[in-house]
């Protein structure tokens, strides 16, 4: 009889503990009552009926990364590719995630693999490397449409690796090397072309500048010659003018000297001296000499010259 209260106390304690259910944050628990869906427990403290209600499923509502196993896919040009990826999903409806499929993780994994094989089978090998974003979006769209009935939201899918066979890798490497060498040769030829163009332009500019310099030098030389000729002509004209002025001044002086006392006699003497000097040079400078008839009569010649002087004085 003393054990009965202890047994009842233990039963009450067990009953209380069984009736309390604590749900963590970002989790959802599915409660079944007598084998049927009864409700979804929210985060926090919840009360259930022990032995009648039971927690059948526990789901995390966080974003879950799921590693999709690698598989071999055949491209449109019959090339094998080993592809693996990673899938990100989140449980949005705990009830559907519990009863929509027996295992939504396996369902998502298998569907992602089949969709990936279908998408890659429509592409050629080169396109699979260039259009990863398109492949990812196509897989996400197909999974998201099917996963609605499973209470799951597929957020994104990313391809981790695309690995072709070794012979294809070698061929691709050779193609890349050839393409790089081609671009290098093109770049080198373009550089040589630009160099030749620059050299030609430089030579043309140099020739133009040289011709312009020579033309300017010719113009400067001609201007200089012109100015020199003008200066020479002006100098000769000035010299002639000065000589003429000097001659005129001398004549004026001679003329004025004649009117002075003894001037006529001085002129007479000067004419006689010049006559004698000129007569002395005739035999030295000329082979043929024409002499006047009265060459020996110096006085008569002087008298003739003086008569001319006297006539000019009148």
Image: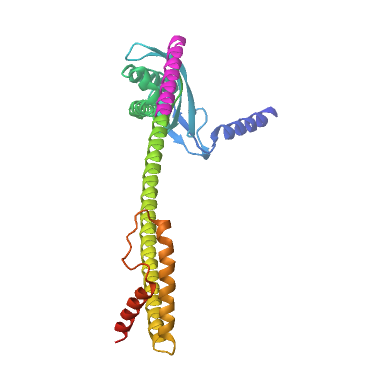
Kindly give the residue lying farthest to the bottom in the view shown: 261
Q: Identify whether 183 is placed above or below 75.
A: below
- The chief SS type of the magenta part is helix
**x 42%, y 18%: residue:** 178
**x 39%, y 63%: residue:** 232
Closest to the observer: 6 or 123?
Answer: 123
Q: Is residue 150 magenta?
A: no
**x 41%, y 17%: residue:** 175
- The picture places residue 195, in percent across and down from the top left corner, at 42, 33
Kindly give the residue lying farthest to the right in the view shown: 2
Q: Is residue 182 magenta?
A: yes
Q: Identify whether 178 is placed above or below 261.
A: above
Residue 235 sits in quarter = bottom left
Q: Identify whether 270 is placed above or below 291.
A: below
The quarter of the picture where the C terminus appears is bottom left
Kindly give the residue lying farthest to the top in the view shown: 167
Magenta residues (range): 165-189
**x 37%, y 78%: residue:** 248
- The picture places residue 100, in percent across and down from the top left corner, at 37, 25
Closest to the observer: 182 or 146?
Answer: 182
Residue 261 sits in quarter = bottom left
Residue 102 sits in quarter = top left
- The picture places residue 238, in percent across and down from the top left corner, at 38, 71
The reply to whether residue 74 is in sight is yes
- The picture places residue 188, in percent across and down from the top left corner, at 43, 27
The quarter of the picture where the N terminus appears is top right
Closest to the observer: 89 or 8?
Answer: 89
The reply to whether residue 37 is in sight is no
Closest to the observer: 39 or 280?
Answer: 280
């Amino acid at each position: 009889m003393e054990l009965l209260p202890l047994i009842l106390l233990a039963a009450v304690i067990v009953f209380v503990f069984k009736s309390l259910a604590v749900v963590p944050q970002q989790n959802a628990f599915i409660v079944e009552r007598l084998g049927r869906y009864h409700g979804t427990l929210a985060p926090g403290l919840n009360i259930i009926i022990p032995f009648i209600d039971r927690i059948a499923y526990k789901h995390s509502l966080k974003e879950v990364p799921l590693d999709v196993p690698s598989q071999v896919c055949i491209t449109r040009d019959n090339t094998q590719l080993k592809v693996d990826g990673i899938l990100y999903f989140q449980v949005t409806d705990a009830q559907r995630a519990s009863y929509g499929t027996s295992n939504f993780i396996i369902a998502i994994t298998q569907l992602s693999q089949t969709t990936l094989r279908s998408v890659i089978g429509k592409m050629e090998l080169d396109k699979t490397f260039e259009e990863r974003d398109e492949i990812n979006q196509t897989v996400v769209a197909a999974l998201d449409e099917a996963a609605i009935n499973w209470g799951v939201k597929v957020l994104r899918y990313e391809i981790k690796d695309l690995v072709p066979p070794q012979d294809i890798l070698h061929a691709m490497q050779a193609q890349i090397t050839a393409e790089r060498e081609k671009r290098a040769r093109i770049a080198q030829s373009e550089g040589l072309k630009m160099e030749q163009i620059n050299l030609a332009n430089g030579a043309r500019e140099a020739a133009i500048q040289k011709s312009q310099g020579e033309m300017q030098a010719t113009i400067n030389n001609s201007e200089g010659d012109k100015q020199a000729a003008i200066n020479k002509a002006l100098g000769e004209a000035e010299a002639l003018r000065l000589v003429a002025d000097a001659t005129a001044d001398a004549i004026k002086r001679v003329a004025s000297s004649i009117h002075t006392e003894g001037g006529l006699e001085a002129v007479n003497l000067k004419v006689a001296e010049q006559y004698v000097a000129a007569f002395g040079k005739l035999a030295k400078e000329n082979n043929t000499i024409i002499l006047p008839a009265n060459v020996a009569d110096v006085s008569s010649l002087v008298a003739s010259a003086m008569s001319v002087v006297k006539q000019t004085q009148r």
